[in-house]
Image (cartoon, coloured by chain):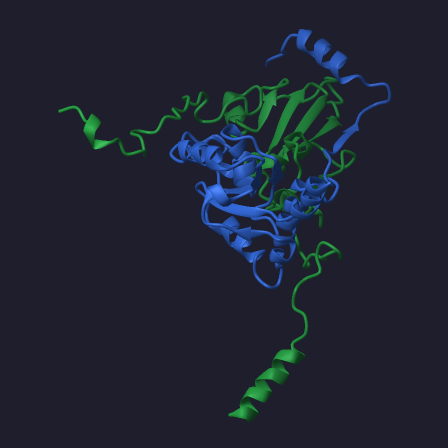
Chain colours: A green, B blue
């Protein structure tokens, strides 16, 4: 029995330190880690493929003639990297950055302004007129600033009543009304 | 002098109260994970407590639903000052994929003032440790918004938008 205990003790001493030295040493991410997304405005063609597949609709495109403004609301990005998979130009990619904690929520909103190519015949950018074509891009693409994803399914949320039904404090029995 | 010494010695021992406001349990597991011997935040004095009245920090996970919002407000009021509110996970930061659903408020900051946001779905345990350190002011902020534009030289976006809005829409 003593031998077995001694063996256990030797195993325990040989285990060494398991705790990660993270805050004092950098912690490398595993391969294929999906962190905060980054993008390149020089490669982007504003096709809207990323915004179409984005599950939380965090990529929103506003078309203004020859300019497309793409907003990334990273406060609701779930880092699924679907945008990276569908992008034909590989203009958006996930990085290794995971230390994205911030006291200010506006740090999590990135934006990109892309100059669009215009038609060689008519000299202006192609713009969808068809209502059915526009319906596909509803909630992620809009004409003009603030038009895309202006409202969700339920545009106006009703106010919340913060009063709880009934008090948690028990009233003294003498004051009960009979 | 003694009060300064106490502030210096006691400021880094953060007691956490963990609140699930409608999370999928993913962030909760990550919060528990930082307490395991592998990540071990107890070496910094952080530990989970069972009551908000004992806590210095509220750890909120989950997109705050309408049902849980009054309880969260009450919980915030029960926590003694000074207090730190840490929103862990994309749900508590911005509402995740339910940001515009009827029963989701879309983030903990709609109900209580949040000190530090930790995005991620779920965030890494290292990211949670980093966020807690950021709340205590031990590490600098690293993230910043990325703003890029690929436009001709001398381009002014506001002037262009004003000019573009005056042009009539050409339809076929």
Rendering coords of residue B116 (x, y %): 62, 38
Q: Name the residue at the front extreme.
A: B2
- The quadrant where residue B66 appears: top left
Q: Is A43 placed left or right of A63 in the picture?
A: right
Query: In the rendered picture of this protein, how many numbered marks are placed on residues?
Result: 0
Rendering coords of residue B13 (x, y %): 62, 49
The one nearer the camera, A17 or A149, is A17
When the figure is inspected, residue B137 is found, relative to residue A134, above or below; the finding is below
Report the quarter where the C terminus of chain A lies. top left
The one nearer the camera, B109 or B124, is B109
Q: Can residue A156 be seen from the camera position used here?
A: yes
Q: Can residue A34 be seen from the camera position used here?
A: no
When the figure is inspected, residue A120 is found, relative to residue B96, above or below; the finding is above
- The quadrant where residue B71 appears: top left
- Residue at image coords 64%, 23%: A62
The one nearer the camera, B129 or A95, is B129
Q: Name the residue at the left extreme.
A: A178
- Residue at image coords 59%, 39%: A77
Rendering coords of residue A159 (x, y %): 42, 21
Q: Is B68 placed left or right of A99 in the picture?
A: left
When the figure is inspected, residue B67 is found, relative to residue B34, above or below; the finding is above
The one nearer the camera, A21 or A30, is A21
When the figure is inspected, residue A171 is found, relative to residue A29, above or below; the finding is above
Rendering coords of residue A69 (x, y %): 69, 25
């Amino acid at each position: 029995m003593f031998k077995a205990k001694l063996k256990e003790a030797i195993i325990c001493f040989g285990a060494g330190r398991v705790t990660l030295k993270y805050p004092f040493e950098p912690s490398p991410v595993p391969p294929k880690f999906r962190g905060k997304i980054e993008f390149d405005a020089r490669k982007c063609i504003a096709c809207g493929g990323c915004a179409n597949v984005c599950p939380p609709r965090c990529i929103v495109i506003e078309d203004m003639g020859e300019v497309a403004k793409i907003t990334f609301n990273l406060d609701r990005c779930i880092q699924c990297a679907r945008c990276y998979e569908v992008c034909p130009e590989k203009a958006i990619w996930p990085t290794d950055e995971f230390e994205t904690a911030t006291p200010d929520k506006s740090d999590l909103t990135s934006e990109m302004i892309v100059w669009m190519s215009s038609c060689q015949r008519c000299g202006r950018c192609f713009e969808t007129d068809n209502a059915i074509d526009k319906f596909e891009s509803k909630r992620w693409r809009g004409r003009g600033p603030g038009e895309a994803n202006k409202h969700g399914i339920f545009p106006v949320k009703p106010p919340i009543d913060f009063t709880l039904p009934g008090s948690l404090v028990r009233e003294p029995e003498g004051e009960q009304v009979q | 002098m003694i009060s300064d010494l106490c502030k210096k010695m006691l400021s880094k021992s953060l007691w956490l109260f963990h609140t699930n406001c409608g999370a999928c349990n993913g962030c909760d597991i990550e919060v528990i994970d930082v307490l395991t011997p592998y990540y071990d935040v107890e070496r910094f004095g952080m530990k989970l407590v069972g009551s908000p009245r004992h806590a210095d920090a509220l750890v909120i996970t989950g997109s705050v639903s309408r049902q849980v919002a009054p309880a969260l407000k009450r919980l915030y009021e029960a926590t003694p000052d000074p207090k730190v509110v840490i929103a862990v996970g994309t749900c508590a930061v911005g509402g995740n994929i339910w940001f515009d659903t009827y029963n989701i408020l879309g983030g903990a900051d709609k109900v209580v003032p949040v000190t530090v946001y930790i995005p991620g779905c779920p965030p890494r345990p290292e990211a949670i440790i980093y966020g807690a350190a950021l709340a205590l002011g031990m590490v600098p902020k690293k993230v910043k918004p990325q703003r890029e534009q690929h436009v001709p030289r001398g381009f002014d976006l506001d002037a262009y938008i004003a000019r573009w809005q005056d042009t009539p829409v050409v339809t076929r």
